[in-house]
Amino acid sequence: KNWKDYLRDTDAEAKFTETGALWMLGYNQASNAAMVDRLARFGVGSDVVDADGLRGMFGGLISSEPMPEYNEAGDEVEQNLGAFSAVYEHGCGHLDSSTCLTDLLRACVRDGIDVRFN
């Protein structure tokens, strides 16, 4: 998130875009609550999200319905997964890889590191 500080380069061009992360791993509410507790121990904010919470965050963009499962004959298999539960992790995001590479090359040159390209 603090790319310019990390590189010690006030002219670095890459910027962090915060998106959050939605973990829909098929775990039940208790397992997801344990994940939220585990993430909190590392200073990562997150919430358990149920189907209503998912609709509130994303509208109809993301469905809480599970992906269908099929047997070898191609028939859909009934899944008894219980109530929908997921984890939303705050603060996640990405840096643009192209500008990161440009910034890293400039930092390497600045620090006298020999960079070779094939």
Image (tube, helix red, strand yellow):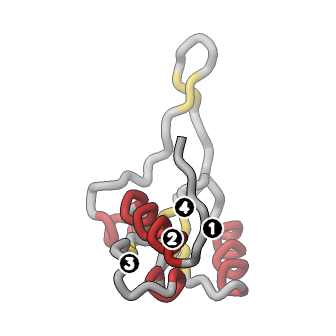
Q: CA distance from mark 4 to mark 1?
A: 12 Å
- Residue farthest along the top direction in this orientation: 73
Residue assigned mark 1: 29
Q: CA distance from mark 2 to mark 4?
A: 39 Å
User: Three-letter amino acid code at disc 4?
Assistant: Trp
Q: Nearer the viewer, residue 97 or 75?
A: 97
- Percent coordinates x, y for residue 24 in the rendering: 54, 56
User: Three-letter amino acid code at disc 1?
Assistant: Gln
Neighbor class of circle 4 (other Cα within 10 Å; few <14, some 14-19, many 20+) is some
Residue assigned mark 4: 23
- Label located before the other in sequence (2 or 3): 3
Q: Nearer the viewer, mark 1 or mark 3?
A: 3
Q: From the image, which quarter does the C terminus lie in? A: top right
- Which numbered marker is on residue 109? 2
Q: Is 99 placed left or right of 110 in the picture?
A: left
Q: Nearer the viewer, mark 2 or mark 3?
A: 2
Secondary structure beneath disc 2?
A: helix
Q: Nearer the viewer, mark 1 or mark 2?
A: 2
- Percent coordinates x, y for residue 114 in the rendering: 60, 62
- Label located before the other in sequence (2 or 4): 4
Q: Is residue 40 above or below residue 13?
A: below
Residue assigned mark 3: 12
Q: Nearer the viewer, mark 4 or mark 1?
A: 4
- Label located before the other in sequence (4 or 1): 4
User: Three-letter amino acid code at disc 2?
Assistant: Val
Contact (Cβ within 8 Å) of mark 4 with mark 1: no
